[in-house]
Amino acid sequence: MLWENIIIQTMRKLKHDEISRNRSSLETLHQVNKLPVYVLLDSIRSAYNVGSIFRTSDGAMIKKLYLCGYTPHPPKKEVLKTALGSTESVPWEYTEDPIEVVMKLKNEGVKICALELTDSSIPHYTVESNQFPLCLIIGNEITGVSHSLIDLCDFSIEIPQYGIKQSLNVAVAYGISIFELRKTFDLNDSL
């Protein structure tokens, strides 16, 4: 029989304590090679999306998360519930005016990038290592990144869509984009 010649390899799911041994702690975060990306949330409506973005930001280990406009922020319980403690590991601040944050970062030499469909947006997987450090702007679930912020951007990225919808949930889109940026950084950093 065909199955007789097949070697079956088994894999074992890691236990929580095995996974934890290889993870950073709040005490060792200063040793982690942080992704040179600042993230600005521009009037996100859902506290659950914000909590999810916190958790994803911890996974990618970004520099800082800026919560702007009417974006819900800690200590709002829905943010904390979804963030699962990542509000402690991700540096963040609330600033009402996102333009203030963008201008500060621009003055520090940070490139500004919107995750938004524009007439010149590039696929999210084409960002190059010379575009770091950057600030990734994530817009409102309905209206996207505001025009006043797009006017300040150096470039914009988009996630190509192949179905009938033109966009993804904001937290999902952020997750796809930030881990693609992490991959670009890690691959270049190892060269």
Image (tube, rainbow, N blue to C red):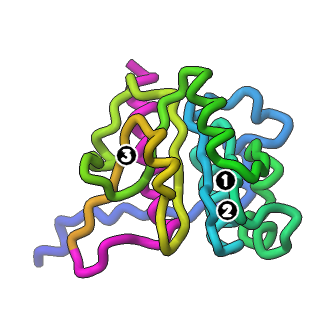
Mark number displayed over residue 19: 1
> How far apart are labels 1 and 2 at the CA level?
6 Å
Picture coordinates of residue 11 (x, y %)?
46, 62
Look at the image and say whether residue 12 sits in the magenta stretch.
no
- What residue is shown with label 2? 15
- Name which quarter of the figure residue 79 lies in: bottom right
Q: Are marks 1 and 3 in contact (CB under 8 Å)?
A: no
Question: Which of pointers 1 and 3 lies earlier in the amino acid sequence?
Answer: 1
Distance (Cα) linking label 1 and label 3: 36 Å
| Horizontal relation, residue 57 to residue 139: left or right | right
Q: Residue at x 69, y 59 (%)?
A: 69
Q: Is residue 131 visible?
A: yes
Q: Identify the residue at image location x=37%, y=39%.
A: 155
SS for dot 3: strand
What type is the residue that disc 2 sits on?
A: Lys
Q: Is residue 61 visible?
A: no
Question: Residue type at mark 3?
Answer: Ser
Per the rendered image, the range of residues in magenta is 163-191
- The numbered disc on residue 156 is 3
Q: Main secondary structure of the magenta part?
A: helix
- Rendered location of residue 20, percent (x, y): 72, 51
**For residue 81, side relative to residue 144 (left or right):** right
